[in-house]
Image (cartoon, rainbow, N blue to C red):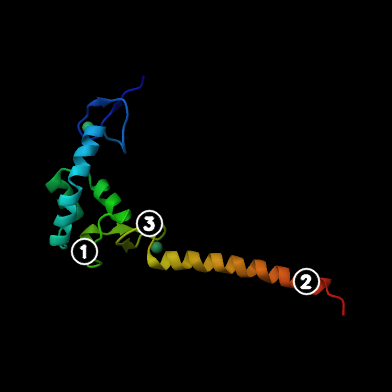
Amino acid sequence: MDLYTCKKCKKLTKSLVRGICSDCYNEIESKYTDVKYYIYDHPDAKLADVAKEYDIPAAYIENWIREGRIVIKSESEGFAVHCQKCGKPITSGKLCGACISKLGHQLRDLDAAGKEKSTHASFRDTKY
Ligand SMILES: [Zn+2]
Ligand SMILES: [Zn+2]
């Protein structure tokens, strides 16, 4: 059986959750509530500082923010994650509002283009 090295405690383990062993994973999850309230109380703190304070990889806190498990205020720039399309700081999810609405427009345009085509087709079929 393959063994993996936990990124956090460097122990060998049979399975990894997001790069760490289940012990470390549970330890991090158990700090979730503390971290959440720390961020609410210290909106001016930096993600890296909180990660250091609680001994959690910053990527985990970022994940909680993306998943919406930690809701940050828009002015808490230290905790901003980044839009995966344009890199703009966002407070949750994967894309910024502008990219989401752009995507929405593209979908609607595609939809409209499809409808237009079928309208033209039916015009061609109609004999006057
Ligand atoms: Zn570990
Ligand atoms: Zn964006």
At x 20% / y 54%, what residue is drawn? 47
**Image quarter in which the N terminus is found:** top left
Q: Please report the residue visible at 22 percent of the width from the left and 33 percent of the height from the top.
A: 23
Mark 1 sits on what residue?
76
Is residue 62 visible in this depiction of the protein? yes
Q: CB atoms at circles 1 and 3 under 8 Å apart?
A: no
Q: Which residue is mark 3?
A: 94
Nearest to N terminus: mark 1 or mark 3: 1
Which one is nearer the viewer's eye here, 99 or 71? 71
Of the numbered discs 3 and 2, the one sitting upstream in the chain is: 3
Task: Judge left or right: residue 121 versus residue 37.
Answer: right
At mark 1, the secondary structure is loop
Q: Position of residue 6 (x, y in %)?
A: 26, 31
Between the C-alphas of marks 3 and 2, the distance is: 41 Å
Q: Secondary structure at mark 3?
A: loop
Q: CA distance from mark 1 to mark 3?
A: 17 Å
Residue 12 lies in quadrant: top left
Question: Could you tell me which secondary element the residue under label 2 belongs to?
Answer: helix
Between discs 2 and 1, the one toward the N terminus: 1
Name the residue type under label 2: Ser
Q: Which residue position is annotated with label 2?
A: 122
Instruction: Identify which residue, 108 or 33, lies in the foreground.
Output: 33
